[in-house]
Amino acid sequence: MRYLQKLIRQIKTQNGITIEKTSENEEGEDSQKLSPDLKTNLDKIKKIFGESCDLVVREFSFGKDECIKAGLVFIDGLTNLQMINDNIIMPLLFDSRFFRSDNSVSISSIEELGETLVSVGDLKTVQTLPEVTDASLSGNAVLMIEGFDKALDISVKGWDKRAISEPDTETVVRGPREGFIENLRTNTAMIRRKVKTPALKVVPIKIGDRTNTQVNILYIEGIADPALIQEIKRRLSNISTDAILSAGNIEQFIEDAPSSVFQTIRYSEKPDTIAGKLLEGRAAIIIDGTPFVLSIPMLFIENFQASEDYAVRTSYATSMRILRFIAFFISLFGPALYVALATYHQELLPTTLLVTMAASSDALPFPAALETGLMMLAFEILKEAGVRMPRPIGQAVSIVGALVMGQAAVEAGLVGAPIVIVIAITAVASFAIPFASEAVSLLKWMLLVLAATMGSFGITIGSLAIVIHLASLKSFGADYLAPFAPYQTSDLKDTIIRAPLWAMRTRPRSLNPQDLKRQNFNIPYDPTKGNENKQGEQK
Amino acid sequence: MKLENGHVSERALMFSVFCFMQGTMLRAAFIVAITKNDSWAMAFTGLVFSLLLIVIYVALFRRYPQKNLFEINESIFGPIFGKLISVLYLFFFLSLAALNTHDLGDFVVGHMMPGTPLTAVILLFMLVCVYAIRKGIENLLRLSTVLAIIGVGAVVINSGLILKDVQINFLKPLFQLPLEKYIQGTVTITAIPMGEIVAFAMIVPMLDKNKSAGKALAKGLVLSAIFLAFIMLRDIVTLGPLITIVGLPSYESVRYINVAGVLTRMESIYAIILISLFMFKVGILLYASVLGLAQLLNFKSYPPLIRICGASIFFYALIVFEAVMENVDWGATTAPFFSLTFEFALPTFSLVAAVIKKAVTPQEAEG
Amino acid sequence: MKKRKAKAPKHDLIRKTNRFPQFAKRATSLILCIGIILSFSSCWSRRELNTLAIVLATAFDTTTQPEMLQVTAQVVKPGQIKASSSASGGEATQKAYTNIKSIDKSVISAYAKITRMNNRTMYFSHNRIIILSRELAEKGISEEVDSFTRNNETRLNVYLLVSEGKASDILNEEFDLESIPANHIAEMIENQKINSETAITTLRDFDIAMLSDSTTPLVPIIKIYETDGKNDAKLEGTAVFKDGKMIGEFNVSQTRGLLWVTGKAHQGVETVQTDWGQVDLRFSHSQGSFKIVKNEDGSTGIRIKIDARGCIDSNATEEDISTVQNLEKLEKKAEEYIRGDVEDAIKQAKALSADVFGFGEAIRRDYPKDWEKMKGNWDKEFLMLEPEIEITVSLTCTGGIGKPIVPGGAE
């Protein structure tokens, strides 16, 4: 007991330690400002970066008789050297202005230099050392001139990026195949290309004390709920941690219910998905360095929606949705139902099926529940191994899995054939709903335990608990089970069914959009009829 | 100092009433024993009387808007006597919850998994109910719409599948029983499923100010009555005279379904729906007890009491009946009087007292 | 704790204070409690598949000792079924079922006795048929009916049969088309719908009939007969019960008449002897019903209405039966045959003094006050009933060909 108390005290005090270092940065503001003396500045910068060899400090002089001394600071690898050479150094060194025969050519301010001489598109002035280091770490070059206490932060970013390719996690049959890459600006550009309206706002914020990761919040003004954006900004600005290395990090810091198995923030790798969500009234968070973009808020049915659904036709899209729901139920309840039926409720099986199952379980050593648990475990290990394996060995793993787990185990009489089939179908079904599979793979186990001990009563109780949990989840103010739990008929058109596109006149009400109307067709819409379809006068 | 800050919409309230009563409907043996093959008509006569009950409740709500039942009691009778009356109501809610839980436990142990001790079943069930109320009664009420749709859908599908085995002749002879049986049947239906909506008197304050509680309750009752009549009709035409000897008419009639040798054993769906509906009902009753207890003890918030009430219902449910026969006996003889005291007598008494009080002290703006 | 107040907490999102250790403590205790409870419960009511003896048919016989009952349960052997199906159904050296016998005072005690001899529990949910021997039926079967209806495991749609001879013999017969006799018999019963010569009774129908004051339940009779040295089972006739005891039987044509009256004869074949020869008729959609009518003198009468619709199935004569006049003649002949069957059935019912048709129930439903008066005396009242029979036969088609295949028929 005392040990437990000590442990708890330790955990409490640990929380007090980490904040101290941030206060360091706030003291001594004055020493951070740039001084007019070039050498001092350069020395300070060299000291900050210390041993790092990729910092390049290029000192040069230009002007008549080399009167003006300048120093260029940048980090090799982050910048486009061509641009530095051509657009910063060359104009400064060779500009005719400085070779006129008349006397004093002086620069009145460094802004003038920036305005007239440096031929780069994006530049601004900085005054403090932290800004200089930030700028150079972002891939900009900083130009300091002797005699001025400001510096020019010139954007010459250029590094190696992955080419835009089809994302691995979300493949589609019919629809755009672009996927986000790790570069923030390219990602925002991809979305801008889809939504060409100035109402699309890109709000910057920097998170992470050591990583200083750039994060952008995207939303469409006029559609998104201002309260939502406010809340997102508040939660993001409250994160004060060391490192943000992936979208998941941010997701776990701002989500509503961290202890729940269901995710309340959706991620996506495709710009058209995110664009679609922005247009419904959601907000997106893009993080530099990861191709996964978060979309807020998330509703439960989004687990079953794929961007492809809107690209294919109504009947097929509806059948695919229904199929995904069925797959969800199979993957969640499959093993548990099998155990409950085989152990407690044999009267629910048709006679011939029961006889077959009894035949296969005649000679088996383990009870049905244990068998199912073992097979599920084996499959989970197989799945994890398949992901971590380097590709050449992947083939062997799948062969081992199929042959050993399936065939040989059944023939050796260790497990029954029906169990292997059930587990296989469950596993395949869980791949049909990629977003919900994390939650499902955990809940499966809970339901299996309940089924093994209390039969179908246990399964019912377990699923009631899950439903209640879902009903009480909120994602940034939107009810998770909308439009089922607060029942909204108008939102049901995009859940289990996918209503025809011309029928989706309003945005989902559960997201509280500012502008409800999407389009204005008469229902039903027949393209062959003339202009009577549009209600009122449309431009 | 409001204990509950949630909101519920009118539609959610209506469907909550519906779900609340559906559970009891599926175990309608007590009514069938009295009026046999005319039981379906009792649903409608019972509805008429229940509407009368609603009139009483609404009159009370109108006088004391935004107050739940226990607060109304305190307002009318003053702190001490009001608390006494509230204790009576609390006892009623707890008893109802225990009775229903025991009912469900009996069903599970008797028909789904014989051999399991009642304790485990009730324990697991109460755990879920406590969890549901912990997460907030609002969420439970919001689920009522979907639950109602699923329940109705399941019953309709089951009824459709059994159509080929029905014999309409079982409905005859119509209305041949002595009148006292019909009166007894009406009273039983009013008391047992329909009157229990007095528990909603604790939830009504969550409705927004300009919505009418009476309309929502009445609509819910009408829906339930129609559905109850439908279920009884289906049972009567399927089972005929067997309905009076079988313990669970709806269960047996669903068990008989056999379509093409493939679609059999539909009673599993019935069982799942029943468990869900009972969880809903016991959840609401648990909430009513918890809120009431918090009111009585002047607590500022009610969550700490949820587990206590849940545990007391658990133990109460275990001891409430010793044998199934006692349950049937109770339902046939004592239950109507027990329920009607709290559903009819006490509210009427409160209303009369309120009227008198208002007449005697007209200058007080609030009661 | 003083330290904490000076600094801002690490993740100030929704939670203002750090309650994780408290949460962890509670969660652990909850999981432990649930785990303990659930692990105790693993010994209740669970039945592994390999501990079940799935009973597909049960048979009841009398024994030499008067109060004792012999119970035979046909249990399927799952392993053998698999072997026989994978061995292309040919060389099933072992039977896929086994019959377990037990003798004791009542149904339940006999089954309880089986557990002393068997390593598996009897599982009745898939029981499809119950066969009672004729001797037992004549002694009274109310005990068997009650125990099967009361039990939760058994279902109300089991078929009942009465066997001529010992019931357990029927379960011992081997049939060619099915490996398990129970399946064969059950499917045979379900097949009878095409023929309309057997009354199909499930336990539920039997219960409903037994609960009535007037109706007497019916159960089909199954017999074993020999052809070419092999035994086969056949459904022939119907047993009539009263007060739980078998009091008599109906033969095949009487059963058919009975089915016509109660409206259960939907399809069937009738062979009609005409002046020209033999013609076979097949009825496809037939309906029969009876109604209670009040006569002028206030007494109740029954009006039976039968509407048979059929086709000509085969023509063994040389006459062209597709002409309208011949069709009418055939219809009249068919009507006579049906009337004969119906009257035969009514006569036999009166001889047995058993209201197999359900006339009493109909009177109770439509004229409850009259029923109150007739109730006590129903046996005599039943004998005095003279139902009016109204039969309409319509032959609507003649199959694929019209004229007969005889020399000169093509003209």
Image (tube, coloured by chain):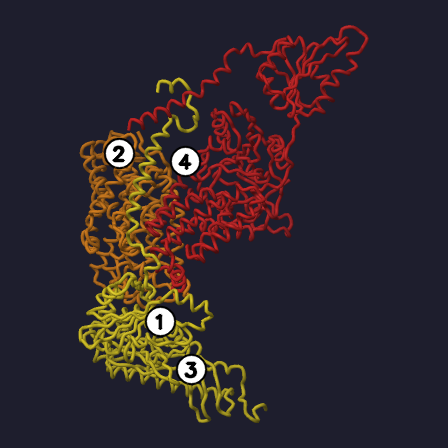
Chain colours: A red, B orange, C yellow
Q: Chain of mark 3?
A: C
Which residue is label 2 attached to? B294
Is there a contact, CB below 8 Å, between mark 2 and mark 4? no
Q: How many numbered marks are there?
A: 4
In three-dimensional space, the C-alpha distance between marks 2 and 3, rounded to whole angstroms, equals 77 Å
Can you tell which of label 3 and label 1 is closer to the viewer?
Answer: 1
Residue at the image position 75 percent from the left and 19 percent from the top: A90
Q: Chain of mark 1?
A: C
Can you tell which of label 1 and label 4 is closer to the viewer?
Answer: 1
In three-dimensional space, the C-alpha distance between marks 3 and 4, rounded to whole angstroms, equals 71 Å
Which residue is label 3 attached to? C269
Position of residue A251 relative to residue B99, above or below, is above
User: Is the residue at mark 2 from the same chain as the one at mark 4?
Assistant: no
> Where is residue C194 shown, x and y percent of the image?
42, 76
Amino acid on which the number 2 mark rests in the picture: Ala
Report which quarter residue C308 is drawn in: bottom left
- Residue C332 in view in this figure: no
- Between C54 and A141, the one lying in front of the other is C54
In three-dimensional space, the C-alpha distance between marks 3 and 1, rounded to whole angstroms, equals 27 Å
Can you tell which of label 2 and label 4 is closer to the viewer?
Answer: 4
Is there a contact, CB below 8 Å, between mark 3 and mark 1? no
Within 10 angstroms of label 3, few (less than 14), some, or many (20 or more) residues? some
Quadrant of the rendering where the N terminus of chain B is positioned: top left
Which residue is label 4 attached to? A259
In three-dimensional space, the C-alpha distance between marks 2 and 1, rounded to whole angstroms, equals 63 Å
User: Is the residue at mark 2 from the same chain as the one at mark 3?
Assistant: no
Report which quarter residue C239 is drawn in: bottom left
> Helix, strand, or loop for circle 1?
helix
> Helix, strand, or loop for circle 4?
loop
Which residue is label 1 attached to? C182
- Residue B286 in view in this figure: yes
Amino acid on which the number 1 mark rests in the picture: Ala
